Image: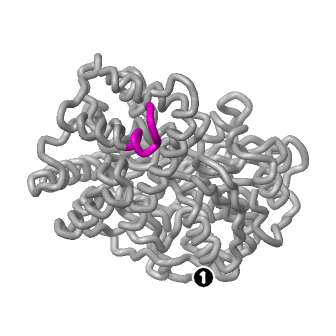
Amino acid sequence: MTARRLALTAAALALVIPLSGCVSAFLPEKRESVSTPTGEKVAADLEGFYSQVLEWTPCEGDFQCASAEAPLDWADPGRESIELALIRQTAGGGTMGSLLVNPGGPGGSGYDFVRDSLDYAVSDRLQGSYDVVGFDPRGVNASSAVSCYDDPAELDAYLFELPQNEPGTPAYLDELAAASREFGAACLENTGELLGYVDTVSAARDLDLLRAILGDEKLNYLGYSYGTLLGATYADLYPDTTGRLVFDGAVDPATTEFEVSATQAQGFESALRAFLTDCITGEDCAFTGTVDEATLQIRALLDSLDASPLRATDGRQLGSGSMFYAIILPLYNAGNWVYLNDLFASVLAGDADYALQLADSYYGRDPDGTYADNSTEAFIAINCLDYSSDANPEALAAEAEELARLAPVFGPSMSYGAIGCANWPFPSTRERVAIDAAGSAPILVVGTTNDPATPYVWAENLAAQLENGHLVTYDGEGHTAYNKSNACINDTVDDYFIDGAVPATDPLC
């Protein structure tokens, strides 16, 4: 999950789930080994990849760009190759090597993140010490990418068209299943066999390749949100080459599909209540009365949009699904709460335009109706490969009832997510298990106590699972904490990356 995206449809948040620690099936056959530029030994069939020399050229102002080749299929490197896009800012002073950064998703562009938001991604201290490298994982944006629809209007239809049947009914489930099958078929037709190789284990193997050809004996890595899962997978696969790794806004690899939905629904509910507490005590709030009364009004508003959608000036209709994303987008960061009050005031006044603008921002949809990147399509493709889903109707109905009980505002909008991947062109058989990364270097796991997207308990869990994990807590609001919370978090992370300082105990920032 990035700071902008968490899921695809109102029912798809359950797809943001971790992968199996079992990787033996992905190991290529061992052959005669050869040396790489970093002095390592790799199988002969990987020599061409690990010995490649990156050609950096000036780009995007003061940055440098390059492209790397990776195997399409790490189990059979002799097949086709794919391209990985990289961008870097070289260190302002003496370099400590490369620091690779991933913004999350899955499907978030590390290339765009570094190009557009370098100061948001890492501090000035780190920029002065490391070459900061952004990369697009396989399937994403400027790398060899997933593509599902040539016409953005088709993606519009998939994201914004309202369901024709009542949620939870057999006809509704059939409708969702048909839409997901059609979407998957379009992705396969446009993407080809790459669609079957955008899983996180393959991306973690790419990460080791990038480490080596960047000339680093150890990986230094900063992963946000889903990027923590990518980093943890790397550490599990390659513990001996872990350098300094920080996971901010952690995903728990062992959480079940339902627990993901339930915990996230409660997380967003908690963030919403924090916003309402602040709003009601201020001026010009769209709500009056108590926080409990306001949450009931919001749930009633979502129900009313299902019964009678609002039409925007561009012709699209605002139902509860798009309204759900319009609400959760500002909840990622307390600094954006002002948009929430404007959102509720406009919709309560019968205006759908502002809500759809927020939903468009969530999906990366530009005002002209085009999409800025492929992050929505990549999000689905990566998750559907990583995690199997149980779409049993009886189980889904029981889970929907429980979600509504646990999180009355958001739970109903986060039900039935398993259907999205149940009809994907490529099956997944992985189980959700803990990642311990036995033998790794120390890893910092940063968690925010009221993070709605990756709830704090996930950071606690991942830090406990990792053999050498160290929890760093930020007591506050918002999704992820480094470089956007307080000096305690920033200094702890920077001191670790620069000096290798590992806190003896959780600093409780």
Quarter-of-image position of residue 337 = top right
Looking at the image, what colour scheme do you see? one colour
Residue 10, given in percent of the width and then of the height, sits at: 32, 47
Q: Could you classify mark 1 by the number of other residues whose Cα lies within 10 Å: few (under 14), some (14-19), or many (20 or more)?
A: few
- Which is more toward the observer, 156 or 3? 3
Answer with left or right where residue 177 lies relative to residue 145: left
Label the magenta part by its dominant secondary structure.
Answer: helix
Q: Residue at x 44, y 80 (%)?
A: 25
In the displayed image of the protein, which residue is found farthest to the top? Answer: 313
Answer with left or right where residue 401 lies relative to residue 407: left
In the displayed image of the protein, which residue is found farthest to the front? Answer: 289
Type of residue at label 1? Glu
Q: Residue at x 60, y 65 (%)?
A: 459
In the displayed image of the protein, which residue is found farthest to the right? Answer: 94
- Which is more toward the observer, 40 or 196? 196
Residue 228, given in percent of the width and then of the height, sits at: 59, 61
Residue 254, given in percent of the width and then of the height, sits at: 48, 74
Residue 260, given in percent of the width and then of the height, sits at: 42, 63
| Quarter of the rendering occupied by the C terminus | bottom right
Residue 368 is covered by the magenta coloring: no
Q: Residue at x 69, y 60 (%)?
A: 473
Label 1: state its secondary structure: loop
Span colored in magenta: 288-295
Q: Which residue is mark 1?
A: 32
With respect to residue 226, does 364 lie above or below?
A: above
Question: Does any portion of residue 42 appear in the rendered image?
Answer: no
- Which is more toward the observer, 304 or 169? 304
With respect to residue 125, does 204 lie above or below?
A: below
